[in-house]
Amino acid sequence: MAEHSAVEIIIAKRDGSRLTDAQIDWVVDAYTRGGVADEQMAALAMAILLNGMEPDEISRWTAAMIASGEVLSLPDVGRPLVDKHSTGGVGDKITLPLAPLVAACGAAVPQLSGRGLGHTGGTLDKLESIPGWRASLSLEEISAQLADVGAVICATTPTLAPADRKLYALRDVTGTVESIPLIASSIMSKKIAEATGGLVLDVKVGSGAFMKTLELAGELAETMVRIGGDHGLPTVALLTDMSVPLGRAAGNALEVAEAVEVLRGGGPADVVELTVALAREMLALAGLTDVDPAAVLASGEAYPVWERMIAAQGGDPAAPLPRAGHVETLTADRDGVFACDALAVGTAAWRLGAGRARKEDPVQAAAGVLLLADPGERVEAGRPLLELHTDTPDAVGWARAALAGGVAVVDEPPARADLVLATIR
Ligand code: URA
């Protein structure tokens, strides 16, 4: 690879130029190997955040991130592979019912996930609340489980897109996370390296999401769908509402319990609706259009797939889930309509111990917030509205402070957006 200078590349982007393919390939590779310093990559990330990237420049950046590591090579597992990624939201446990549902419908889901940071919980943290469940699998174990059960949710391997691992940690401490080219290339490099046959993206919009407006979420979704197309990965994005929590549970074990209700054919209507909408798109990408995921979910047929998926990774699906040592209930102070903001609930769950501030922090399996009424529901004074669960009662005051202003009983029902706001193909 021809020699380049990191300073020249930073200056080019600082002055608003498109980086050449050779510059992109060099800087991503050199950064991964330690030949470009963190402070230089931080300056480049800030220049990208401020000046943006052209569509083909983002695709090349993504290709360089993929090339920094291995592309997973899974043997034929006898079913079409299709995956889903969510940009993260409060109470977003959808992967838990979705993977077994799509497997029950005939596809295979290789979901390699990360852990949660901040107010949105990570899928692995949720599953680790199940006694015995193990996140780390070898490539052989992933392949065998895909062929046998049809669904794997496990930790991503350090060999997939290592440039992203390093760059994401740097962006986290340099105020450069919120760049659409960097977010899109980060997510898509990991998914393309996973070698799935199709990808459905759930791009969240609203107070509890990364993207607070439909316009920004749409731009992120379009960028990711384009990157998928450029790399031969059929990709569809749903833009979905995250102004209120999804379902009634936010917190690791609380969300697993809710996912199990959904897999048994019950559960909150919004969780069921989104699970089915995403499953339909995944099955369409897999070419399986003659099966109705709504009927499969309602019949409870996906539940035995969940049991096998959990047991295959050492978990005991029948074991009781951890329960918090301390539970406090908040009640309505007047008659009216229950209003509940996603960010307030996500922050409260995080402060109760369900999430982490730094990636090395532990999480509490049983901590979180349980809604006892639906947002928009009419309630009477004294009606229990929320339960706060924690093993660290000292955190309750801090969690209540997060809820102040975000959770209230009001006169008029707040305008409620549709759950699925748009689809981008
Ligand atoms: N999730 C990712 O994987 N990368 C980002 O940059 C943001 C969210």
Image (spheres, rainbow, N blue to C red):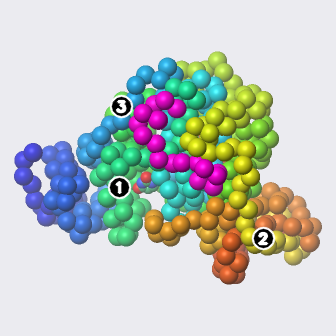
Q: Residue furthest left?
A: 3
Residue 203 makes an appearance in the image: no
Q: Amino acid at mark 3?
A: Ser
Residue drawn at the location 23% of the way across and 54% of the way down = 32
Q: Amino acid at mark 2?
A: Val
In the rendered image, residue 131 lying in the magenta stretch gets the answer yes
- Along the horizontal axis of the image, is 256 left or right of 356? right
Q: CA separation, marks 3 and 1?
A: 20 Å
Residue drawn at the location 77% of the way across and 61% of the way down = 371
In the rendered image, residue 136 lying in the magenta stretch gets the answer yes
Tell me the magenta residue range. 127-145
Residue that label 1 marks: 165
Residue 125 makes an appearance in the image: yes
Q: Amino acid at mark 1?
A: Arg
Residue 327: assigned label: 2
Mark 3 and mark 1 lie on one chain; the one further toward the N terminus is 3
Q: Mark 2, residues whose alpha carbon is within 10 Å: few (<14), some, or many (≥20)?
A: some
Residue that label 3 marks: 73
- Along the horizontal axis of the image, is 352 left or right of 176? right
Q: Position of residue 81 (x, y in %)?
A: 48, 28
- Along the horizontal axis of the image, is 167 left or right of 14? right
- Along the horizontal axis of the image, is 343 left or right of 63? right
* Image region (quadrant) for ligand 1: bottom left
Q: Secondary structure at mark 3?
A: loop
Q: Secondary structure at mark 2?
A: strand
In the image, the residue with mark 3 has its CB under 8 Å from the nearest atom of ligand 1: no
Q: Position of residue 3 (x, y in %)?
A: 7, 52
- Closer to the observer: label 2 or label 1? 2
Q: CA separation, marks 2 and 3?
A: 46 Å
- Closer to the observer: label 3 or label 1? 3
Residue drawn at the location 75% of the way across and 56% of the way down = 248
